[in-house]
Amino acid sequence: MCSSLVLGIESSCDETAAAVVDDGFRIHSNVISSQVDIHHPYGGVVPELASRHHVLNIVPVVDAALASAGVSLDRLQGVAVTAGPGLVGALLVGLQFAKSLAFVTGVPLVAADHLMAHLEAPFLDQADGGPSFPHICLLASGGHTLIGLRRSPFDLEVLGATRDDAAGEAFDKVAKMLGLGYPGGQVIDDHASRGDPAAVRFPRALRGRGVWDFSFSGLKTAVKQHLARQGPPGDASGLADLCASFQEAVVDVLVERVRQAVDHTALRQIVVAGGVAANTRLRAVLDQEAERSGWRLFVAPRILCTDNAAMVAVVGHRHLAAGRLADLAQNAVSSWSGRPG
Ligand code: KG4
Ligand code: ZN
């Protein structure tokens, strides 16, 4: 790959982020401004508030990313921005900013798909090029869950996806039921580390050979029914057991789908991405499986699993290399087309 400095911009949900990445993997800066404190009192992301805070944050965040990389605008070979899926009002802030920047500077513009960007995170900081193609990929975030076969950068076959809640969404909803606030993934992960994953046997939906899709809403309902029957956990250890048991059910299903994909494709390289890939138990179980079954596992450091702009810059690098540029008519899209964009 020839040297190319790409500015990535991400504003699809509640993080305003900008990053400068060289050669599609070398991170020069990675600035993330989280709005968690703003949305926390509401128990979830309030779209209008998210948009307003992106407007306030976008200029300082991009300035900080350029300054900490020591890169001026005239050295950029491209600007890549998340165009979807996500909250349209939030996406539009980053997109309009990137379009203006591209217009004023003449730097080529790339419209990045947020899901594909997550799948690029394990390539970051991998001097040996990271995973090679084809490989199996598992994406588990707050909005999406899918297992797929990625044959090349622009060729992703989705084998299965969630029929209802995403894995991260299940973490967030269960955390809310338990009064643990928003977002729920990390806090459940923390409590679960002190609990017994076998304390409560929660259901694992859609099991069995040939079944590729996921479903997490039944698990969420099972936790709700458990709470209705038993009442809220009486002490810290009861809470830890409940969190560990719920988490185990999610992890079991995700890991089982990876095993199934390995059997189906005979591939051994596995990319795991999205916010839920930050989960301690999921990472540990996948590590054990990789060791036992000879998989090569590629999971990014936690900070690159959740929303960031470095992964968006990798998409930028690939699109620039393939001549896939966006223009000023580019719009934001709320839902996923099902195809790598
Ligand atoms: O990928 P992401 O940052 O944003 C989306 O594209 O949705 O994922 C956010 C999701 C949230 O649902 C959050 O609760 C979950 O990832 N998450 C975790 C952990 N950290 C974040 N879930 C389980 N364990 C974690 N440690
Ligand atoms: Zn995301």
Image: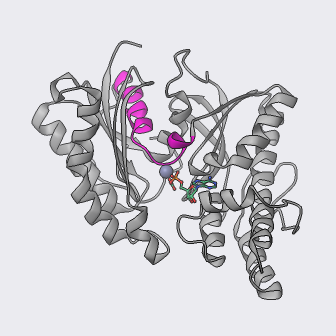
Numbered range of the magenta stretch: 302-321
- Front-most of 284 and 269? 284
- Is residue 341 a member of the stretch shown in magenta? no
Q: How is the image coloured?
A: one colour
Q: Nearer the viewer, residue 55 or 231?
A: 231
Say which residue appears at 61% left-offset and 59% top-offset.
185
In this view, 146 is above or below 314 = below
Q: In the rendered view, tell whether residue 18 sits above or below residue 252.
A: above
* Image quarter in which the C terminus is found: top left
**Could you tell me if residue 339 is visible in this image?**
yes
Does residue 117 appear to the left or right of 112 in the view shown?
Answer: right
Q: Is residue 243 above or below residue 292?
A: below
- Asked if residue 279 lies left or right of residue 24, the reply is right
**Residue 90, position as x, y percentages in the image:** 33, 60
Q: Is residue 303 magenta?
A: yes
In the picture, which quadrant includes the N terminus? Answer: top left
Horizontally, residue 191 falls left or right of residue 1, namely: right
Establish if 51 lies above or below 58.
below
Total marks shown come to: 0
Q: Residue at x 32, y 19 (%)?
A: 4
Nearer to the camera, 271 or 30:
30
In the foreground, 311 or 260? 311
Q: Measured from the top left, where is residue 107 in percent x and y?
A: 19, 30
